[in-house]
Amino acid sequence: MSGNEKVMKEQAAVLEVPRAEKGILRHEPRRYGASEQGCALEYYGPDTAPADILLMASMHGDEVETTVVLGEALRRVPENALKNPVILSVNPDGILRGTRSNARGVDLNRNWPSSNWSANPVYHRDHGGQERDIALSSGASAASEAETRALQQLVLRLQPRAIVTLHAPLACIDAPQASPLARWISRRVQLPLVPDVGYETPGSFGSWAAEQGIDIITWEFPRRSITALIASHAPVLFQLLTGEFDPGED
Ligand SMILES: [Zn+2]
């Protein structure tokens, strides 16, 4: 069987909802907390532990393409075929404001109670890809933000074996453990597997999750249109949501 035939066979294993019905999100949300501004923090899918893979998008509110593409993949999944828990927006206040940070100016990806958390300001690039000279806070203390604490409790409760967190636009699969799952995603979306993003990330979600022994995979979308990202990435996310994939394959 050729590689393409194998992929087609996998994708045929769970049928997508009919196109006419994929506009509406029919999965029941489960609430895991509230943002600093009172937005519901929600996930979809099973709440049984241990979970296999927890998927999440938009820890940074200005990377909204991750929510759009993950939401598209989720709406294609029949209600009884959703096997893994999924969060469409970790940072809803940031999405509402169009900011990388949450409503209090905190970069939620530097607010985690990992051993390397730092009180120093966090500098990031703007979307033009200039030097990293835009300051945000890492929080008054580790886990100072409601979004961080709620997600921390959810992860500790669901005990996922692996977490896939979506970001943009560095175009890589950042996976320090280079697990079979990380290598599978890298092959399927044709993005390079890297051990880090090339700069220090104290207090990042990845640092904290790795310290919990979780296979943490940061999937950085490439700088492409949402239409192109849906075409190349949504089918792979669909497979992760339905559990219809074999990371051992080559
Ligand atoms: Zn990001």
Image (cartoon, rainbow, N blue to C red):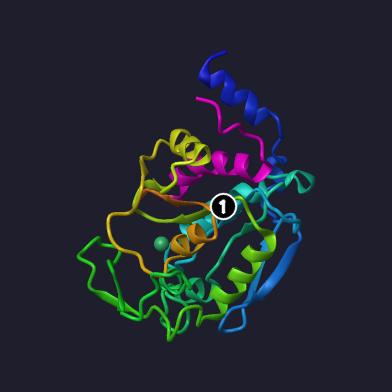
The x, y position of residue 11, in whole percent, is 63, 31
Q: Residue 104 is drawn in which quadrant? A: bottom left
Which quadrant would the N terminus be assigned to in this image? Answer: top right
Q: Residue most toward the right? A: 80
The quadrant of the picture showing ligand 1 is bottom left
Crowdedness near tag 1: few (<14), some (14–19) or many (≥20) residues, C-alpha within 10 Å: many
From this view, report whether residue 212 is shown above or below residue 13.
below
Q: Residue 27 is drawn in which quadrant? A: bottom right
The x, y position of residue 61, in whole percent, is 46, 69
Q: Which residue appears at 50% of the width and 35% of the height?
A: 184
The kind of secondary structure the magenta stretch mainly shows is: helix
The residue closer to the viewer here, 128 or 3, is 3
Q: Give the range drawn in magenta.
A: 226-250
Would you name the residue on which mark 1 appears?
70
Q: Mark 1 is on which residue type?
A: Leu
From this view, report whether residue 174 is shown above or below residue 188.
below
From this view, report whether residue 224 is shown above or below residue 188.
below
| Secondary-structure class at tag 1 | helix
The x, y position of residue 94, in whole percent, is 48, 74
31 with respect to 110 (left or right): right
The residue closer to the viewer here, 89 or 206, is 206
